[in-house]
Image (cartoon, rainbow, N blue to C red):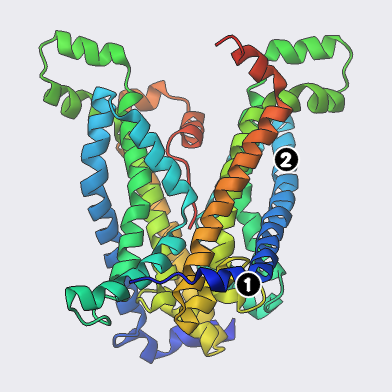
């Protein structure tokens, strides 16, 4: 405990590249970038599956594979590939070696929860609503944007919440492969037998994850349309997390 | 590009077997511990529904903590003993097992419970002989997710486990340290295959435990 306080009290740990602010920014940047990249793939596909009901099997399969293949396994398998490709593509093998395997694993990991939440959210919208919208003369695009999306938003945010938490956890593991972020304190703390540094890493990572969870669950409640909030039982969100966007650990 | 030395794997099958057994050990112990706790809490939820909110919140909070942090937190206390891996692994199973067990036990129709009461079942025997069997499909769904997740997490535990624990994940850490691709892939692919095998096994267990679902689906 004293070691932990000493670590936080040491001014040196708040400056330079290895300081807490920079490590935190590294962690957040790579996490957000990974989720954004994953969204660019998962959202359009999820909209398509959810709105048209086609390609559902593909969505389910992606979700299942994503659940069974842990990001750490993906990360380490990409490492030799990156090294092997270096002479072929002619780049310095040390250049992207730390970043790309970690980042790619994070992106691949974030796709399934966003994809599943998107199409499950859209599909949860009552068919009578979409049909009456169609009857009122709304175009397919208007139905998607003005009717289905607002109603699906809570489930969708839930998917982002799961994706972001997984990505934050994976970025932590990335430190083992030489990546930056808060995981560095844990890996370096173990290597140097510096319990203060190790605990600081644990605390910072846990606070980042829990903070993210709190912010996104607040957003989830906030963005739920009022009508839906009244109509749904509070227990429903936890039930939908069982069969819809299942939590998945890294 | 990536050279897999099959001959090396063939020559080290005993090592593969040993690490697979440890992987399964690190799956089984936390799952059993996690299930006992989750089940007890779920039974409590039937008697006192007010506990569901707080229990879900606490297990959810623990579930949110990134795995590497959870494994690292115990090192100064339990060192590199198996407990350093078992405690966080068991903790991580709690949320999924609890939520699904509660949902399973609650899915039993009230008429069924009333019929059991009318037939003279005591609360305990009703739980064991009526509610529990009917909750099996949802409980097993939770067990499957928890098992697959735990297998992946054991691999991560190897990062801090050194040569002590981590099951097949130890091949990954050794392979990374010695720059030996075969070991890296053996550990990574091995743990994924193990996850699929265990999942398939659990599907079989579920069919065995719920023969009536098969009879109902038999018409097709």
For label 1, the crowd category at 10 Å Cα-Cα, with few meaning under 14, some 14 to 19 and many 20 or more, is few
Q: In the rendered view, does B216 fall on the left or right side of A42? A: right
Q: Where is residue A137 drawn, in percent x and y?
A: 10, 12
Identify the disc placed on residue B12. 1
Q: Residue at x 65, y 19 (%)?
A: B213
Q: Where is residue A26 drawn, in percent x and y?
A: 30, 72
Mark 2, residue position: B39
Q: Taking the image as drawn, is residue A80 in sight?
A: yes
Q: Where is residue B174 drawn, in percent x and y?
A: 54, 78
**Between marks 2 and 1 in the image, the one whose residue lies nearer the viewer:** 1
The answer to which of A135 and B44 lies nearer the viewer is A135
With respect to residue A130, does A151 lie above or below? Answer: below
Identify the disc placed on residue A30. none
Q: Which quadrant holds the C terminus of chain B?
A: top right
Q: In the rendered view, does A129 fall on the left or right side of A186? A: left
Q: Chain of mark 1?
A: B
Residue lying furthest front: B7
For label 2, the crowd category at 10 Å Cα-Cα, with few meaning under 14, some 14 to 19 and many 20 or more, is some
The answer to which of B173 and A179 lies nearer the viewer is B173
Q: Taking the image as drawn, is residue A221 in sight?
A: no
Q: Which element carries disc 1, helix, strand or loop?
A: loop
Q: Residue at x 38, y 79 (%)?
A: A178
Q: How many angstroms separate mark 2 from mark 1 (CA)?
A: 40 Å
With respect to residue B145, does A103 lie above or below? Answer: below
Mark 2 or 1, nearer chain start: 1
Residue B107 falls in image quadrant: top right
Residue B134 falls in image quadrant: top right
Q: Chain of mark 2?
A: B
């Amino acid at each position: 405990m004293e070691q932990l306080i000493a670590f936080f009290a040491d001014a040196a740990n708040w400056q330079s590249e290895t300081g807490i602010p920079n490590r935190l920014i590294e962690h957040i940047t790579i996490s957000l970038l990974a989720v954004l990249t994953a969204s660019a793939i998962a959202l359009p596909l999820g909209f398509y599956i959810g709105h048209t009901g086609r390609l559902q099997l593909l969505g389910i399969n992606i979700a299942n594979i994503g659940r069974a293949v842990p990001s750490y396994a993906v990360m380490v398998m990409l490492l030799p590939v990156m090294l092997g490709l270096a002479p072929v593509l002619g780049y310095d093998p040390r250049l992207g070696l730390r970043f790309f395997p970690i980042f790619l694993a994070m992106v691949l990991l974030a796709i399934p929860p966003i994809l599943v939440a998107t199409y499950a959210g859209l599909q949860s919208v009552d068919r009578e609503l979409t049909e009456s919208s169609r009857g009122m003369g709304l175009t397919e695009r208007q139905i998607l944007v003005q009717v289905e999306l607002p109603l699906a938003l809570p489930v969708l945010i839930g998917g982002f919440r799961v994706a972001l938490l997984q990505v934050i956890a994976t970025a932590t593991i990335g430190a083992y492969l030489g990546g930056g972020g808060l995981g560095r304190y844990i890996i370096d703390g173990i290597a140097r037998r510096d319990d203060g540094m190790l605990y600081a890493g644990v605390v910072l990572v846990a606070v980042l994850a829990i903070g993210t969870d709190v912010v996104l669950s607040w957003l989830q409640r906030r963005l739920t349309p009022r009508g839906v909030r009244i109509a749904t039982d509070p227990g429903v969100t936890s039930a939908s997390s069982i069969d819809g966007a299942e939590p998945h650990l890294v | 590009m990536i050279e897999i030395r099959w001959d090396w794997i063939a020559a080290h099958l005993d090592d593969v077997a040993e690490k697979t057994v440890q992987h399964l050990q690190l799956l089984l112990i936390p799952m059993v511990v996690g299930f006992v706790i989750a089940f007890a809490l779920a039974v409590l939820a039937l008697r006192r529904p007010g506990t569901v909110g707080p229990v879900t919140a606490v297990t959810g909070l623990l579930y949110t903590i990134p795995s590497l942090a959870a494994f690292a937190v115990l090192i100064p206390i339990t060192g590199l003993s198996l407990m350093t891996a078992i405690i966080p692994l068991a903790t991580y199973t709690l949320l999924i097992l609890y939520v699904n067990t509660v949902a399973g036990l609650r899915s039993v129709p009230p008429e069924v419970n009333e019929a059991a009461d009318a037939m003279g079942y005591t609360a305990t025997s009703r739980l064991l002989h009526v509610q529990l069997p009917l909750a099996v499909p949802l409980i097993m769904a939770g067990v499957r997710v928890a098992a697959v997740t735990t297998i992946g997490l054991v691999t991560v535990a190897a990062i801090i486990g050194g040569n002590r624990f981590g099951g097949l994940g130890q091949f990954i850490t050794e392979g990374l340290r010695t720059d030996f691709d075969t070991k890296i892939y053996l550990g990574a692919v091995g743990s994924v295959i193990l996850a699929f095998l265990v999942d398939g096994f659990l599907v079989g267990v579920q069919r065995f435990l719920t023969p009536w679902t098969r009879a109902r689906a038999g018409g097709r």
